[in-house]
Amino acid sequence: MTMKNGGVAGGRPGGRPSTRGATRTAAQSLSRADRVALGKEARGAAPLEAQGEFRPGKSRDPVGLLLGQADSRVPELVPVRHGRMLVSPFTYFRGAALPMAADLAATPTSGLRVQLCGDAHLSNFGAFASPERQLVFDVNDFDETLPGPFEWDVKRLAASLAVAGRDNDFSDKARRKIVLAAAKGYRKAMHQFAQQPLLDVWYAHLDIEEAIEQFRSQIKTKRFEKAETLMAKAHTRDSTQALGKLTSLVDGRRKIISDPPMIIPVEELFSDVQADSLYDLIGTVLSKYRLTLQSDRRHLLSQFTLEQMARKVVGVGSVGTRAWIALMDAGDGVEPLFLQAKEAQPSVLAEYAGRSQYSNEGERVVAGQHLMQAESDIFLGWTRATGDDGVDRDFYVRQLRDWKASAPIEIMIPSGMAIYARLCGWTLARAHARSGDRIALAAYLGGSKRFDHAIADFAEAYADQNEDDFAALQVAVKDGRAEATTEI
C-alpha cells in the first residue's frame, strides 16, 4: 500500500453516550499496555464473532424513515430522490443511510468510538487534489459525520461492497473475497498505525496514482490503461472544465445554463425578488462563510467576485437537500472558481450515537472532514442562511470540482473491486486512527481473521435485507405511499 508519511463506553445495544469528548483517546491517561488491555476487554462487550450478527427488528419501517426525511427537503425534489434510489438495490443502499443507522444501533458494538464518516459506502471514497496538487485517495462525503462506534463505518463499507457485487452479478465466493479484502485491509492498517508515532499517522495519506502502479502486476493491461485514463481525466476536472460544461456566453458574460430541475439559476427560482436584493443577501451569506476560513484563504477568496448562483441537484441520498453552486471569477471571465454550498442537516446517526456538539451542522461536517481526511479542500468552510420561507439552514461550502474522480463501480470486475476494497479499508482505518485509540482498536481486532469473516457474514446478511427494503420502496411507490420520478 502506498503510504506517505475513545475508550470503551459499553458495547451492547441500548446506551447512547454523549458525543462531547467521544473521540478522546485513552492515550491521554493510559499506558500502551493499558490501551492494549482496553481493546482486548472490549471483546467482552462485543466478541469478534458477534460482529457478524444482524437480526432485523420486527418493527422496522425503512420506507417510513425515508419518508420522514422528506419533511425537511425541497418538496418537488423528493420524488427525484426516490427515483434515483429505485434504479438498483445499490442506488437504494446509497440513499438509505438512515435506515441502516437504525439497524446498526441494534447490533453489538465494542464501545470503541471514533469520528465516523456515517455513510462510508464504497462510492463515498474517491480521488481529489490535495493543496499540494497531488491526486490523493480518501473518504469524500461527510454529510453524516459524527462520533460513534467504529464498527458502523466498517459495516456500511462492507455491506456496500456486497450489494454492489450483487448488482454486478458477482458470485457468492467473489463477493466474500472482496469484503474480506476490505476488512483485512482495515485490520492490517490499524495494526500498522498502532505501531507508528501519532504524528506519522496524521501525516499519512494515499497517493492513488502510485497505489495503482503498485497493483499493476495484478491488473490486466487494458484495465490498467483504463485506470490511468481515469486518473488523467481527473486532472482536467476543475473550475475551468466546469465553466465550459455548466455555463454559456450571454451578451459577453458567462451565465449558468438553466436545466430544470437539475440546475436552476437563482433569478429563475426567485423571479419575484429584485436581482440586486437577492445578490446582496447572497453576498452577506458568503461573507459569513469567508470568516470560517483561515486567513490566507480568506485573502485568496477575496480576489474573486460572485458572478451568479444556481440551485443544483446532487447525489442520491442528498437529493432534496438544498445545494447551490456559485460561479466566482478573478479575471474578466477567464479565472473561474466554482463553489458548492450544500445544506447540512442533522446527521442520521444523531438519534443513535448522540447529538453533535456543534450548534451549526455545517461546522459539524467541516470539523469531521478535517478530522478524518489527510488533506482537505482549501475552501472548506460553513455558514448559515435564512431561506425564502424564513427558516434558518446550515450549509458547508467547498469547491465544486478539484480533480475529483470516482471509481466506475458498475463496470468493475471482481479482482478490481477487491483491490478497490483494500484501498477503502486502509483509508478508513487511517481516518479512524486519527480520532480514535488506534492501539485499543488494533488490540480489539487482533491478529486472526475472525473479525474479517464476521464482517463478511454481516455484509451478506445486510445485502439480503437491502434487497427486501428496495422491494418495499418499490411497493410503496406502486401503492402511492411514496412518489418517484424516474425520468431524471
Image (cartoon, helix red, strand yellow):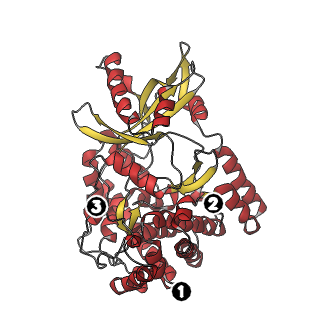
Q: Is residue 63 left or right of residue 328?
A: left
| Residue 112 found in image quarter | bottom left
Distance from label 1 to label 2 (Cα)?
27 Å
Q: Is residue 381 left or right of residue 178?
A: left
Label annotation for residue 448: 1
Q: State which tag comes first along the sequence, 1 or 3.
A: 3
Disc 2 designates what residue?
Answer: 4
Which of the two residues, 364 or 349, is positioned nearer the viewer here?
Answer: 364
**Disc 1 to disc 3: CB gap under 8 Å:** no
Q: Secondary structure at mark 1?
A: loop
Relative to residue 213, is residue 319 depicted above or below?
Answer: above
Label annotation for residue 20: 3
Q: Is residue 42 left or right of residue 402?
A: left
In the displayed orientation, state which residue is furthest to the left. Answer: 390
Residue type marked 3? Arg
Question: Circle 3: is it few (<14), some (14-19), or many (20+) Cα within 10 Å?
Answer: few
Identify the image quadrant of the N terminus.
Answer: bottom right
Distance from label 2 to label 3 (Cα)?
31 Å
Residue 259 visible? The answer is no
User: Which residue is located at x 46 percent, y 41 percent?
Assistant: 398
- Residue 338: x and y in percent read 51, 33
- Residue 10: x and y in percent read 29, 78
Question: Circle 1: is it few (<14), some (14-19), or many (20+) Cα within 10 Å?
Answer: few
Q: Secondary structure at mark 2?
A: loop
Q: Secondary structure at mark 3?
A: loop
Which of the two residues, 28 or 411, is positioned nearer the viewer here?
Answer: 28
Q: State which tag comes first along the sequence, 2 or 3.
A: 2
Residue type marked 2? Lys
Relative to residue 81, is residue 274 depicted above or below?
Answer: above
Residue type marked 1? Ser
